[in-house]
Image (cartoon, rainbow, N blue to C red):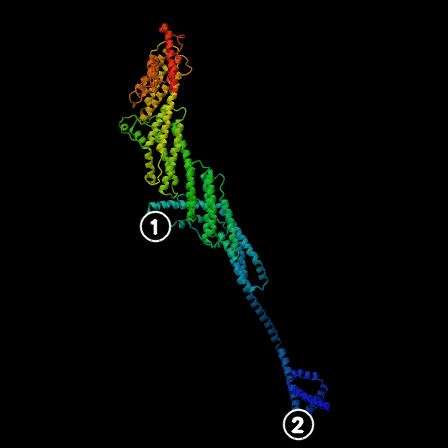
Amino acid sequence: MERGKMAEAESLETAAEHERILREIESTDTACIGPTLRSVYDGEEHGRFMEKLETRIRNHDREIEKMCNFHYQGFVDSITELLKVRGEAQKLKNQVTDTNRKLQHEGKELVIAMEELKQCRLQQRNISATVDKLMLCLPVLEMYSKLRDQMKTKRHYPALKTLEHLEHTYLPQVSHYRFCKVMVDNIPKLREEIKDVSMSDLKDFLESIRKHSDKIGETAMKQAQQQRNLDNIVLQQPRIGSKRKSKKDTYIIFDTEIESTSPKSEQDSGILDVEDEEDDEEVPGAQDLVDFSPVYRCLHIYSVLGARETFENYYRKQRRKQARLVLQPPSNMHETLDGYRKYFNQIVGFFVVEDHILHTTQGLVNRAYIDELWEMALSKTIAALRTHSSYCSDPNLVLDLKNLIVLFADTLQVYGFPVNQLFDMLLEIRDQYSETLLKKWAGIFRNILDSDNYSPIPVTSEEVYKKVVGQFPFQDIELEKQPFPKKFPFSEFVPKVYNQIKEFIYACLKFSEDLHLSSTEVDDMIRKSTNLLLTRTLSNCLQNVIKRKNIGLTELVQIIINTTHLEKSCKYLEEFITNITNVLPETVHTTKLYGTTTFKDARHAAEEEIYTNLNQKIDQFLQLADYDWMTGDLGNKASDYLVDLIAFLRSTFAVFTHLPGKVAQTACMSACKHLATSLMQLLLEAEVRQLTLGALQQFNLDVRECEQFARSGPVPGFQEDTLQLAFIDLRQLLDLFIQWDWSTYLADYGQPNCKYLRVNPVTALTLLEKMKDTSRKNNMFAQFRKNERDKQKLIDTVAKQLRGLISSHHS
């Protein structure tokens, strides 16, 4: 039962579902019926559904049949009317067909014309399109042609601009054409070609700049010289100064045009030809000689191509190499001034170019790069100058070099380069210049001293007198009153030496010009150099003259007189230096001249040489002495050699009239003492083993001649008998022997008022020993023959007593 109920329930349920599906099929669009049918086939009762469907179809057919039976008459009427219309339609068709045939026949030509018109229209559209495309392509081709022309004429920067326009403006509009693709592929090659060519132009420029640096530097230094001359004129005429330009405005006169499209400027290697100007014409600006367009073009080309850093590095690297070449001095630079000038010109030319590049480009070179180069240049230049200037032995060349260095420093200072180290180095060269001056003046002084006649300058007229006084500061009222002809006390070397000292001071002053030194520094430099000249150079020259072997007493006397006057002129040299430096001698730290000491030393050396020379002359005369120590004859006149010696001394001391009194007196006293000493040595020398009383008498005559000379006052200024004291030892010794006054000598020996105070017992004993046993060889005691033995005993007794005095004196 339960199964029956369940089956019945399922059957009802299936029937309801089939009914729903049928309604859905009837009401649903045919395109969407698929899902509905799928639900039928998904179930298991599709057989029963088909039965249901057949039943529903039959019901609808019955309804259609009923509907048709109800409207059948209307349908028949409609068919009848349609048949009538078909006949009419056939007629109309025939008419239309005939009309169409006629129309086709009549419109055949029109169709042909229309076809032709169609073709023309098509061609017109194609031509118009072609013209439009060509209008787009023509600017590209024109720009490309312009590019090729610019490349051909080497106008590379405009070519690069054209290439940029072509690439970014024109080619994108026609990029689908094959020729445009070829152009696009060729653009990198063109860029590289422009880079290479512009770099080649830059290399040519750098090479040309390197070769012509000396010309550029020469022009810049000429401008600096002209500006310095102008400044000197302005200092003298201040009113002109208001219209004067600044130095740098005067120097930098050139075209800063960066871009130039003329073929000439494109092909220019960098240096313009400039003919040599006359000295009186204006010197062109240093940068007027240079066309910098290759640098500007290459810089902008590389900037546009995005390779500016590469260009900057290359330019700086090449210029550094050139700087090292420029700073390498030639090995023979020190031989001539032109060698130094060319060296400086190249350095100035190099830095003038770099300074211009610094101020006309943005970042190609910077101040740090310039400063680095200048530091390197400064150190190498100073080192080179120190080395090569040390070889210079000509003071004129050193002075010219100094002026050239000053001009070199002033030129570079105008362009903003620090040059203090150059001026410091000039102070070092100043010392070297002083040394070369001293060497030069040593030769001058030697020539003056060698050529001098060492005789007072004769004056025959007032004109000659004034000329000499104008050369040397000398005033003598008594000499001025004397009639012509007359003589100056000094010889010609005095005014010559004095003037050469002044010339030396002028030479020192020349070097100090333009060194930016204060008056005090200049004064100190001149005084120190002059002191070296006096104390070393002139002093050595004077000493060499004084020490010459063939120097005579007359020359020595004249040297003393000359140095005395030169010593007095030192104050005038002080005034001379003060006048040219405007620094008073009383100023603190002012160096004093040592000329007085120099001339005093020279005079003292000459005096000593006079004393030595006199003694040598006396010795020469004494060598002529030829005493017969064994003679028994009593002479009545002095020996010939001594008479000649006294005559020589008289004539010599007559020349000493112009010497200072003490010098002449000292010389005279020295000569007399040396003569007395030499005579004593002659009397006591060991070779004279024996002598007679007659020989002593002759010797006594010679000594009296000497004493007579001393009493005659050969040199004024001696007190009474002062000069005779030189011979007192000889006089007392001879008196003792000739008078044979031994009792007095022995009795008074040792007392202050002893008559024979200056007789030494050793000397007396030596001479007494020489007189022993002479009676056997000569007639010394002939008149006392019968007392000969007593006399001999007396000599022995005196000798014994003298030995006692000597021994007691030693004890």
Few, some or many residues within 10 Å of mark 1 (<14, 14–19, 20+): few
Q: Position of residue 30 (x, y in %)?
A: 65, 84
Q: How many marks?
A: 2
| Percent of width and height locating residue 125 | 57, 69
Q: Amino acid at mark 1?
A: Ser
Instruction: State the quadrant of the C terminus.
Output: top left
Classify residue 342 as left or right of residue 193: left
Quadrant location of the N terminus in the rendered image: bottom right
Q: Nearer the viewer, residue 9 or 244?
A: 9
Q: Is residue 719 above or below residue 236?
A: above
- Dot 1 or dot 2, earlier in sequence: 2
Q: Secondary structure at mark 2?
A: helix
For label 1, the SS is helix
- Residue at 35% from the left image edge and 46% from the top image edge: 234
Q: Nearer the viewer, mark 1 or mark 2?
A: 1
Read off the residue under disc 2: 70
Name the amino acid, label 2: Phe
Quadrant assignment, res 575: top left
Which residue shows up at 28% across the image and 26% down it?
Answer: 484
In front of the other: 732 or 465 = 732
* Residue at which label 1 appears: 242
Quadrant for residue 670, please give it.
top left
Within 10 angstroms of label 2, few (less than 14), some, or many (20 or more) residues?
Answer: few
For residue 20, which numbered disc appears in the image? none
Asked if residue 144 shows in the view, the reply is yes
Coordinates of residue 159 in the picture (x, y in percent): 52, 57
